[in-house]
Amino acid sequence: MLNHDKQIKIFLQQLLNHSINEVVISPGSRSTPLVKNILLNKKLFNLHLVLDERSAGYFALGKSKISNKPTILVCTSGTATLNYSPSIAEAFYSKIPLIVITADRPMHYRDTASNQTLNQNNIYSNNINWFYDIPITNEVNFVSNIAYKAVYLSNNAPKGPVHINWQFEEPFTDGDLQTLISTPKESVTQDKEFKLNSDEIDNLLPMVENKNGLILVGSHSYDNNHIINLSKVINWPIIADPLSNLRNSKNYKDNVIVDSGDLIYRTKNPKLTPDTIIHIGALPVSKFICNNLENVKNHIFIEPSHRISHGFFNMSLHINSPIKSIVKAIENKISKRSNNKWKDYFKKINVRTRLGIEKHLYGIKEISYKAKIIESLPKDSIFISGNSLPIRILDIVLNKSEDVKFLGNRGLSGIDGNISIAAGISSSTSSPVFLDLGDLAFAHDIGGLITAKRNAKNLTIFVNNNKGGQIFNLLPQSKDLKDIYEKWFITPHEKINISDLAKSFECNYFNPNNEKEIIEIVMKKLTKNINIIELNLDKTDYTQYNSYIKKAIDSINFEE
């Protein structure tokens, strides 16, 4: 039995011991030792073959988004490793666990111009939690520790990708292999109930008690019930980002969920400025919320690691205890207000803003279409929002949804890899999965359709065909650069036919002409094959988009 086979057996056994068994493999020669050992034990692993490493990385990221534990990525050496880079960066900034294993040639081939030899030593260094370069060696037992560290350092706060670069020399196999056993042990994820110490409570209470405050919640990994309980204890409204999954109708009862913060905070109104903000999770999609609240006196961050999303804010206090522990620690120390004009005010303003949105913004076809789509989604489905315009429009229209989980990729907010991520999510759940993205994002990941056809279970893709990147029409520089803006920024794609693409990939294709047809398709015509729904939208809506927004804001009465 070859030494590298002995090492791999120990490594894989350690992963199985901690219930890490989701594996995404891209084909190649140098990774043969890893792949042959995994395939020998394929009954113990959930295996996926993805041809393109760029797509594979995003696919694995999607799987880890659902499982909340590391997915294993395996590829060969050379440029294959570089194709993982975008998804690894997104995973790092989104705090998504991955275990990336790149095969490599022996170290002595580096810097010799040997074929397919790239210096893979810590090539993802800025975007990973940990790296280890496994050399050619007769030692074997040390890899058990490497595997344990890979699981531990990817799966604990802050979660994220780790990279194992494994050097292999020929021969890759001698036919002598051994099978593994499945003996799951206790998870290495830290899941302890940390309590606030007395100093943290002493610092927290003066910034919370009898203060006008807001709980600002972005995308996060906490239990939303605990956030709701926190809002009840301190009696504050919640500014809920669309990816917080707090805009579920059940959360509005006896709470103030502000779901129109993007429009509300486009105004410089001192009545909307709190004394204290408790920030949970990622930064919100809306830059207007961030910019308008950056000078608030007290900023409290709840985050279980050092990776705090405070890019727009000063930091008054960082608490890494679970929200449940915070509630327990302060619920008997906070005096209840007999009335709360502050909370009631935000409830009124949110209602008024929603009326303004419906009156003035539903004239934009993409907004009205999106509202109908969300209303029509089946119960327990998953809705993935692409970046650029789709996530901003979701922020505007999402209001009191019914048992739908909303996901996005706001770590670096790129438009790449969307179809591959959705395919990874769909492969990991029996729920219907819906992906909403722009036409350019769709074109950017056409290869992801191969991944989706091979692996997705129940995936529907909405393609908002507005003839290019219309978000650029919303930016102020569009007025100053008219001569070059259409070709070099909007980048229309008249020669790409989405219907023909769908046909070539044997996907179901729909092209509704109105809201009624959209609803009928979503509710009655979708199958478990890949469904592509092309929404033809009006370019003129986007040149007038900001004026629609202004009308909606001007219609809001901010008086108490």
Image (cartoon, helix red, strand yellow):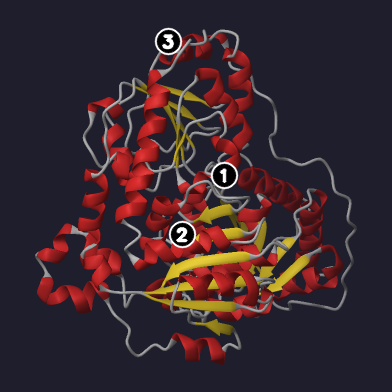
Cα gap from disc 3 to disc 1, whole angstroms: 31 Å
Rendered-image quadrant of the N terminus: bottom right
Q: Nearer the viewer, residue 160 or 491?
A: 491
Q: Position of residue 454 (x, y in %)?
A: 67, 79
Q: Earlier in the sequence, mark 3 or mark 1?
A: 3
2 vs 3, front mark: 2
Q: Is residue 229 above or below residue 180?
A: above
303 to 41, vertically: above or below: above
Whether residue 87 is visible, yes or no, is no
Residue drawn at x 35%, y 34% is 349
- In front: 343, or 420? 343
Q: Nearer the viewer, residue 376 or 155?
A: 376
Which residue is at a point 15% across and 61% down the rendered structure image?
477
Q: Which residue is mark 3?
A: 206
Q: Quadrant of residue 531?
A: bottom right
Q: Residue at x 42, y 38 (%)?
A: 309
User: SS for tag 1?
Assistant: loop
Near mark 3 (Cα within 10 A), the count class, few <14, some 14-19 or many ≥20, is few
What is the secondary structure assignment of the residue under circle 2?
A: helix
Marks 2 and 3, how far apart at CA: 41 Å
Q: Position of residue 159 (x, y in %)?
A: 58, 45
The three-letter code of the residue at mark 1 reads Asn
Q: Amino acid at mark 3?
A: Pro
Q: Which residue is mark 1?
A: 248
Question: Which residue in the structure is indicated by mark 2?
Answer: 371
